[in-house]
Amino acid sequence: MSWNSRRNAWPIAIGADALVVIVFAAIGRASHDKATSVAGVWHTAWPFALGAAIALGITAATKADPRTLAVGVRVWLWALVLGMVARRALGDGTAATFVVVATVVLGALFLGWRLALGWQRWTSRWRRLKP
């Protein structure tokens, strides 16, 4: 059984999506010369992580494969919207440029790992079919 099997889908999705949010927050803080300590990154990341967790919970309830692009879009949009709403409610920045950058970066990361994993699954199936 491959590491990228259906059996491993949830651990992969939870780990990869958590990593996406942490990388997004760490890069954003570093690019603005803010503290990149664990507490600093967590302060930026948690609203987006909450949105991603809710989206993954919905995915689990619908029994969808969390590695699909459709789920990636769900996670991306929930993380983005809930992240921005929480930041706004707490008085943190939601400038238009931040929203645009967050939309693009989170979309690229949440969908990017799913595309790469899907490509790997597709090519390994293709290799098995070749004589």
Image (cartoon, rainbow, N blue to C red):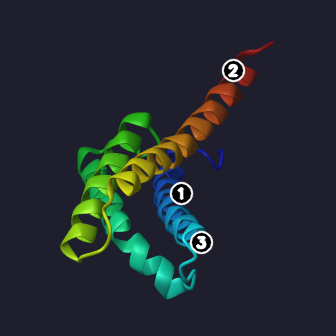
Residue hosting label 2: 126
Indicate the position of residue 9 as horizontal and vertical percent values.
49, 50
**Distance of mark 2 from mark 1, alpha carbons?**
25 Å
In primary-sequence order, the first of circles 3 and 1 is 1
Closer to the camera, 107 or 75? 107
Q: Are marks 3 and 2 in contact (CB under 8 Å)?
A: no
Farthest left residue in view: 89
x 44%, y 79%: residue: 42
User: Residue at 41% across / 43% down in the picture?
Assistant: 72
Residue 7 at x, y percent in the picture? 51, 50
On the image, numbered disc 3 is attached to which residue? 30
- Above or below, comparing residue 87 to residue 75 in the picture: below
- The type of residue carrying mark 3 is Ala
Q: Nearer the viewer, residue 9 or 95?
A: 95
Q: Quadrant of the C terminus?
A: top right
Residue at image location 62% in from the left, 33% down from the top = 121
Q: Which residue is mark 1?
A: 16
**Helix, strand or loop status at disc 2:** helix
Q: Secondary structure at mark 1?
A: helix
- Looking at the rendered structure, the kind of residue marked 2 is Trp
How many marks overall? 3
